[in-house]
Structure formats: C-alpha cells, structure tokens
Image: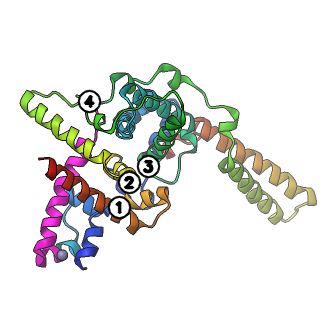
Amino acid sequence: MTGPAGADPWAADRALARRCVRGDDGAWSELVHRFGARIYSHCRLAGLAPADAEDVSQEVLVSAFRSLGSYAGCSLATWLYRLTRRRIADHFRSPQRRLVPSAGIGAAAERPSGDDPERALASAAEARRIRHALATLTEPARSILVAYYLYETPVREIAGEMEMPVNTVKSHLHRGRLALRRHLEDRS
Amino acid sequence: MNCHELELRLYDEDCRCALLGEAPLPRDVQAHLGRCPACRKTWSDAATDTARLSHELLFDPPPSLLTPPRSVGSEQPSFQELIGWPELSWGLTAGAVLATFCGLLPAALPWCQWTGFWTGAAIGLAAAVLERAGIALFPEWT
Ligand SMILES: [Zn+2]
C-alpha cells in the first residue's frame, strides 16, 4: 500500500513511472507485476469474459506505457484504475463484446492451487462467493469498492475520481461492505 | 467521536493500515472502541472484510499479461507526446528568469532581455523535453 504521508506521497510511483518512460525493462516488469493482476481482476469483476479481460488489460498496459510521461497528481494505482475504467467503458460500447452473466463473474476456477487442495478449493469457493456478491451491488458502490479494496486507492483519491464528497464515498463503502457481508451470510 | 463518525473513520488510510494489522490503532479510534462494545464488533468485522476483500477480489491473471510484449518496451514516444503544457511552462519560466536576470545587469541593452528570454526559453524547453523523453540531465535527482 502506498501511504500518502510526507511532502510527496507519490514520489516512489513517479520514480517508477520515470524509469518506465526511459525504457527500463526492470521497472516495466515491476509495474506489470504490481498492477497486472489488479487490472485484469477489475475487468473480470466488471463482467468481461476471460479473453476480453485479457485483451482489455493488454490495451490498458500499452496505453499506460504510452501515456506514462503525463502521469501526475495521484498514485499509480488510481491512475491505472482510471485508465482501466475508461477502457472497460469503451469495451462495453463496442459491438464485438462477449457478455458474461453476472453469475459467471465468480465462476472461473482461477485461484492459487497451493499445497493443500482442500484448502485451495475452500478458498476458491469463498472467492467466487465474494465476487458474486460484488456483482449484485449497484453503481457507484461497486466501482468504489473495487477502487478501495482492489487498487487500495485512498478514499480522497476515489472522491476526486468520482467527483463526490469524501464522506459520500465512505458511506458507499460502508453500505457496500455491509451489503456484501449480508449477502455472504445469507448464502452460508 | 460518535458511532456514526467511527463508521466513516474506518475508511481512512491510517485505519486501513490498523485494520490490516500494519499499524497501531489511531488514538481517537482506540478511545471510542474502549467505551463502545458495538463499535468493537464493527471494527472486528471491518478487519475481517478488509483482509479478505483485498485478497479474494484478485483473479489470477493469464501469464501472457505478466510478460510485456517487446514492442511495448521498445516503443519511443512521439513528438506530440514529448511537448505538452508542462514542457512549455518550463520553457516560459526559464525564459522569464533569464530575461529578468539580463535586465538586472548594470550594462543591460534593450535587446539583451529579449535575447535572454529566448535563450532561457530554449534551454528550459529542451531540458523538459529531454526529461520526458527519458534522457535525464541529472539522473541522481530522480
Ligand atoms: Zn460506537
């Protein structure tokens, strides 16, 4: 998590972005490893089919590389969240998109296998339930929860991105989290 | 702090860190939890949710996504991507500074300030463009 404390809370992110712009392969790998899974997960949670999610995530990363020179004013996580959100919106406007029913959002068996198969299965089931519960939330609560929990974006930055007061974002987060919790309790 | 304020306080960054066990409880939160059993339950639920939501919302990405295509790493930014408002601002600022400096010289001639402005602007713009292009003039500063 990048904690915004001190004079320049995003100094490390800006340094990473600069190294990427200079063509430093190590920096690019670091960025992709830090954010690739979050971008892909964001696409899947928005209801994209796996193949579409992969395509859109690749587009986001290419677009990020091209525009990293203009990155400023927020954490990299927030910047990439914004980029991904726009790409997902573009995708839903395109006629070639593949539709995934909301029940299918959590259906992919994509959890780490680990050493203990039973534990891995239980963990996969829990992940599926949570993702399905998230799909039942309405906007903007769902997007706010994705930004806060998946990208670890601070509330203040989400408020700026969504153009709403900080306390409104917090209320959405709180109500959304309680709705998820209720949904999970009802199903178990 | 009342119970509603605590509910909203849960989503501040210091509380997120405390919920994840990465930082101590903020004092104001600790004081409220000390006297409010209902909010102790709220806090405990939030800790469980914060840990599991950060983890369980993540899908395993396809391996191809984690291997950036070579073409991406070798692409160079275009001219339009190299000159934007920040670069122009740097140019104008450097020009203004040098023009002011030239104006302060004891034997300043009328054309001296304009020459200073354009020289400063050119140097400022070039430095900002080189910086954006990835050719840092002072790499140890970045
Ligand atoms: Zn209370």
For label 2, the residue is: A144
B107 horizontally vs A10: left or right: right
Looking at the rendered structure, the kind of residue marked 2 is: Ile
Q: Earlier in the sequence, mark 1 or mark 2?
A: 2
- Write down the chain letter for disc 4: A
Q: Which mark is residue A108?
A: 4
- Dominant SS type (magenta): helix
Q: Residue at x 73, y 45 (%)?
A: B123
Looking at the rendered structure, the kind of residue marked 4 is: Ala
Q: Residue at x 76, y 49 (%)?
A: B121
- Write down the chain letter for disc 2: A
For label 1, the residue is: A172
Residue B37: image location, x then y, percent: 10, 73
Q: CA distance from mark 4 to mark 1?
A: 27 Å
In the image, is the residue at mark 3 within 8 Å of ligand 1 by its beta carbon? Answer: no
Whether labels 1 and 2 belong to a single chain: the reply is yes
Q: Residue at x 92, y 56 (%)?
A: B111
For label 3, the residue is: A78
